[in-house]
Amino acid sequence: MTSSFDPFSGKPNDGPSDDAPEPSSGQAFPAPPPDYISQGTPPPPPPPGQPQGPYPGWSGQAPGPAPVYVKPSGTSAGLALGLSIVGLLVCGGLLSPVGMIMGIKARNQIDAGMGNPADRGMATAAFIIGLIGTVIIGLLIMFFFIGVAVAGS
């Protein structure tokens, strides 16, 4: 006969304990509870005074204080988009680099979780429009210097 070791009590386990009664041949075990899920019927309500829930003692509420939703602070995506559009249409692209940089910063804030995720599209649009305006400024400056160089020769 081999003995096993019970890790919870730290004592050797020599077999079944004498505390548990062994069923006699005439004693029947209680029937298992019905499986209400496979039958498609709801289980009966609990007796009065017992809470109803997925486990005993459940009162229907999570313990502790209710979770608090913290709304992320606003980003500057709207301002960046406005500056990009105004810079592209009105100022010949002079405000577009500022709108492009602000659009990048707004996207970084959103990615870090410090801004409203719904503003990500607005920040991306500000970056793209600001980039277009910045390219236009670069082309205008390049054509200006080419024109000055050609006219001076």
Image (cartoon, helix red, strand yellow):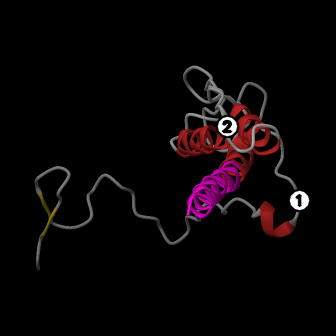
Give the foreground label among 1 and 2.
2
Decide which of 37, 102 is in the foreground and name it: 102
Residue 11, located in which quarter of the rendered image? bottom left
Decide which of 144, 55 is in the foreground and name it: 144
Decide which of 120, 37 is in the foreground and name it: 120
Check the image and name the residue furthest to the front: 153
Decide which of 17, 152 is in the foreground and name it: 152
- Residue bearing the label numbered 2: 95
Residue shown at 61% from the left, 52% from the top: 141
Mark 1 surroundings: few (<14), some (14-19) or many (≥20) residues within 10 A: few
Is 105 situated left or right of 7 in this image? right
Residue shown at 21% from the left, 67% from the top: 15
- Residue bearing the label numbered 1: 41
Number of numbered callouts drawn: 2
Residue 150, located in which quarter of the rendered image? bottom right
Q: Distance between the residues labelled 1 and 2?
A: 67 Å
Residue 152, located in which quarter of the rendered image? bottom right
- Residue 53 at x, y = what percent? 70, 39
151 in the magenta segment: yes
- Residue 24 at x, y = what percent? 47, 67
Earlier sequence position, callout 1 versus callout 2: 1
Mark 2 surroundings: few (<14), some (14-19) or many (≥20) residues within 10 A: many
Question: Please, what is the three-letter code of the amino acid marked with disc 1?
Answer: Thr
Q: What stretch is highlighted in magenta?
A: 130-153
